[in-house]
Image: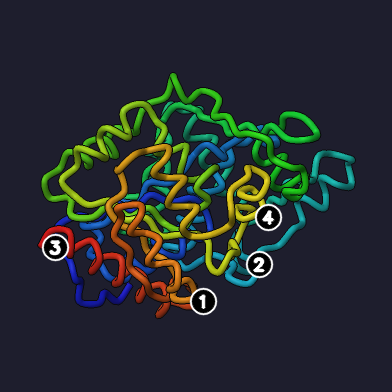
Amino acid sequence: MAQQNSVISGKVLALSGGVGGAKLARGLAEILAPEQLTVVANTADDFDYWGLRICPDLDSVMYALADLNDTERGWGLAGETWQTIAAMRRYGGDDWFQLGDQDMATHLFRSQALRRGDSLAQVTAKMAAQLGIGLRLLPMSEQPVATRVHSDIGELAFQEYFVRERCEPAVKSLEFSGLAQASMQADFAALLSDRELKAIIICPSNPFVSVDPILSLPGCRDALASAAAPVIAVSPIVAGLALKGPAAKMMAELALPASAVAVAEYYQQRYGALIDGFVIDSSDAQLAAQFRTLAAEVEVCPTVMTDLDSKVALGQACLQFARRFAN
């Protein structure tokens, strides 16, 4: 990764869901030295399939950081093949979750390591190092947390809702099973008390199923509030639309307007004044004045990431915005 001139010294923490968060994480990785950046990924989407432990958000971030992700399909690995799932289908087995042949190695390696006693952070670090990723990529927790979707067709595991049902059921509410018994991953918790931490960036990920599980971990809100670094959130809603995933649809079903302001209001209602500043897209510039009523700072810039340059540009904008809070 050819690093640019960083606009910030010290350490940076990025909190990420899947594809959208992975894009910004890749931009930040281009700017910052590996020892500066830690990415913490949501693990409430994780589940078992075919006897394997699947970690969709961790893997999306890992593949993006290694430049191995399929940018056209938006998930999984580039150059993927599908022989295994075709064979499983021939036997009449479950085939609703698309596991590619290369991707299968990730899940096999992880599952074997977990059975041997490795922690999720340890096996993630091993895989990331083998893929040439120098920065620290962490799961939000070592304990299992599972997003449960209460919908108009009943209760669903998140991947059942997201993949098998294609986000079609109407969402009534969300629940994070196991959350009360979980704790922040140890390195994640330690970083929040590190005086060298200069910016905490909430990536443009789904507020309800990607960001909430992280921020709702016992002790996380207080640790973030006590951290020396400002907390910056990038809106996943652009001009009333979610560029990837069901965030805008969920907002409508949860009686929230699909707008960057509504995302900010949602975070403030749940977490108070935890977030210091919000980054919104240039197409939503007319909304900036509304953030004054939230007593929140706002940065307006292009947030749609279509290539490496746009990922880097958004990363630079987030870091510059964070630095303003230290001045």
Give the secondary structure at mark 2. loop
- Which one is earlier in the sequence, the residue at label 3 or at label 1? 3
Report the colour scheme. Answer: rainbow
Q: How far apart are marks 2 and 3 (CA)?
A: 35 Å
- State the residue in front, 83 or 322: 322
- Which one is earlier in the sequence, the residue at label 1 or at label 4? 4
The residue beneath circle 3 is 9
Q: How far apart are marks 4 and 2 (CA)?
A: 13 Å
Tag 1: amino acid? Thr
Mark 4 vs mark 3: in front: 3
Using the image, determine if residue 82 lies above or below residue 95: below
- Using the rendered view, name the quadrant where residue 139 is placed: top left
Q: What x and y, as percent, mark residue 119?
A: 40, 32
The residue beneath circle 1 is 306
Q: What x and y, as percent, mark residue 39?
A: 35, 51
Give the secondary structure at mark 1. loop
- State the residue in front, 187 or 178: 178
Q: Which residue is drawn at 30% across and 65% down?
A: 318
- Which one is earlier in the sequence, the residue at label 1 or at label 2? 2
